[in-house]
Image (cartoon, grey):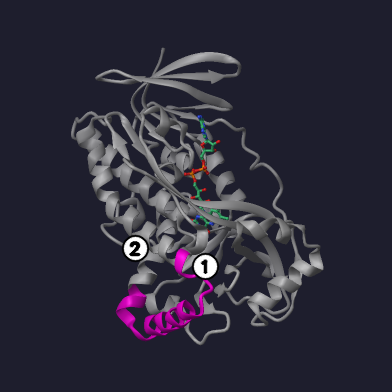
């Protein structure tokens, strides 16, 4: 049986980031990923974009990976939030925070590529891909993981297993941890467009009667579009021909960026909120979408997952230095306690936004406008919103200060 200190299931952005964070500590790590990566595909117009907060940029700094991402990253200088047909408006500016950028828009493919290259060189890390965990047993001192890899059953043993296996987390199920799931009955339609006028590094979030619409600045003057519609309408929107789709977007977004011209391929993502009822057990920690799957309205999912990585890695490394068992509940509970507030704040914030801005009732429209005006006029409230969206709420782990572990 192969022996490890840490077994990570799920090699998505969060699981791979944890492998990077734990590198150089003399640990034996196994990373198990079910699907072979397609990150080798060429960059193209249709790249899916992820908005990284400034806090996540610092975590990538701490992982020594930000330099590899800068050429693919478009900085966000300002966020402009507005409500179609109402008077309220909120602006957030990098100058107010004294930072070079509020965040960055990076193609998910570029993040995947940088992480895939980084994990290949990690000493002490074995990558099993494509491989699937079939069963997990646990004894007092270890977990035993049965895995199907290259058509063979293999058993690994570890002091700790980390579930980074996404919203449906099979590992969460195997440990009998329940989750609270709420279907938003909404679908995010994601594509890229090129507007007539330069985006000037402004991210737009516009609330419309048919759901929130975000335009994020990308390279080559493209904008990434995330348009949330009721799931019942998604099929019809996906079926629109290109010119009708552009006309629908234009009528919702308006002419702030002139005419919307070229549009790319569309993808549809049904949306739900998933919250695991527990984030740790003896020998188990849940991170990323496995513990919280959020509405993408404020672009927080991966940013919160990156903070899980920074916190868990710090807790584990400090425990090892102190001679403690990294899989013990006492150690893992420190991660759970530290991230509890962050999970709650971000979940409540994004869920509240998603629900409030999806209801087209006129009275609510007024409240929204008033709320937005209040936010714009009330520096402390706006500051809190900025801090949350920039990933700077609560105690900051070392990696998020750009420091090594
Ligand atoms: C439309 C949309 C827009 C978004 N925009 C943003 C944004 O702008 N900013 C942001 O921060 N977040 C954004 N998000 C959220 C972000 O994409 C996710 O939070 C993030 O990708 C989660 O990463 P993860 O690694 O936790 O999970 P996943 O990406 O789901 O990875 C889980 C991995 O586990 C593997 N796996 C599953 N089961 C097994 C098994 N049994 N054995 C082995 N491997 C297994 C899977 O193959 C997968 O690779 C957006 C989400 C959506 C839907």
Query: In the rendered structure, which segment of residues is drawn in magenta?
Result: 355-383
The foreground one among 307 and 356 is 356
Question: Which callout, 2 or 1, points at the residue further toward the start of the chain?
Answer: 1
Is residue 147 positioned above or below 353 on the image?
A: above
Residue 313, given in percent of the width and then of the height, sits at 33, 41
> What secondary structure is marked by label 2?
loop
The foreground one among 386 and 106 is 386
For residue 385, which quarter of the picture?
Answer: bottom left
Mark sitting on residue 392 = 2
Q: Is residue 354 left or right of residue 130?
A: left
The answer, for residue 45, to whether it is visible in the render is no
Which quarter of the figure is the N terminus placed in?
top left
Answer whether residue 380 is magenta in the image: yes
Residue 371, given in percent of the width and then of the height, sits at 40, 80
Which quarter of the figure is the C terminus placed in?
top left
For residue 319, which quarter of the picture?
Answer: top left
| Within-10-Å neighbours for mark 2: few <14, some 14–19, many 20+ | some
Q: Principal SS element in the magenta part?
A: helix
Q: Is residue 259 left or right of residue 29?
A: right
Mark sitting on residue 358 = 1
Is residue 340 positioned above or below 346 on the image?
A: above
* Residue at (19, 35) in percent of width and height: 330
């Amino acid at each position: 049986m192969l022996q490890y200190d840490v077994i990570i299931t799920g090699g998505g952005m969060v699981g791979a980031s944890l492998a990077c964070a734990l590198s150089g500590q003399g640990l034996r790590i196994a990373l198990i990923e079910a699907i072979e990566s397609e990150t080798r595909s060429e960059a193209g117009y249709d790249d899916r974009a992820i908005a990284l907060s400034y806090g996540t940029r610092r975590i990538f700094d701490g992982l020594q990976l930000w330099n590899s991402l800068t050429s693919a990253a478009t900085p966000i200088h300002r966020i402009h939030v507005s409500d179609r047909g109402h008077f309220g408006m909120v602006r957030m500016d990098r100058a107010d925070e004294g930072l070079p950028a509020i965040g960055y828009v990076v193609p998910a493919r570029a993040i995947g590529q940088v992480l895939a290259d980084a994990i290949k060189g990690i000493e002490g890390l074995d990558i099993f891909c494509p491989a699937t965990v079939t069963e997990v047993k646990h004894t007092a001192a270890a977990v035993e993981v049965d895995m199907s890899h290259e058509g063979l059953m293999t058993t690994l043993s570890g002091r700790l297993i980390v579930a980074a296996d996404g919203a449906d987390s099979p590992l969460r199920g195997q440990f009998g941890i329940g989750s609270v799931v709420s279907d938003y009955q909404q679908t995010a339609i994601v594509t890229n467009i090129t507007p007539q006028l330069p985006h000037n590094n402004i991210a737009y979030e516009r609330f419309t009667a048919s759901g929130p619409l975000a335009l994020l600045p990308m390279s080559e003057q493209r904008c990434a579009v995330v348009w949330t519609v009721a799931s019942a309408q998604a099929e019809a929107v996906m079926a629109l021909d290109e010119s009708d789709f552009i006309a629908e977007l234009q009528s919702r977004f308006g002419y702030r960026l002139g005419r919307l011209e070229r549009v790319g391929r569309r993808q549809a993502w049904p949306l739900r909120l998933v919250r695991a009822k527990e984030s740790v057990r003896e020998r188990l920690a849940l991170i990323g979408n496995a513990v919280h799957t959020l509405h993408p309205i404020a672009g927080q999912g991966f940013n919160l997952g990156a903070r899980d990585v920074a916190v868990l890695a710090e807790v584990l490394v400090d425990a090892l230095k102190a001679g403690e068992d990294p899989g013990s509940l006492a150690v893992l509970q420190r991660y759970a306690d530290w991230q509890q507030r962050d999970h709650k704040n971000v979940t409540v914030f994004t869920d509240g936004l998603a629900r409030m801005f999806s209801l087209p009732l006129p009275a609510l429209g007024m409240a929204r406008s008033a709320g937005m005006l209040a936010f714009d006029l009330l520096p402390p409230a706006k500051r809190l919103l900025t801090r949350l969206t920039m990933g700077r709420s609560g105690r900051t782990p070392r990696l998020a200060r750009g420091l090594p572990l």
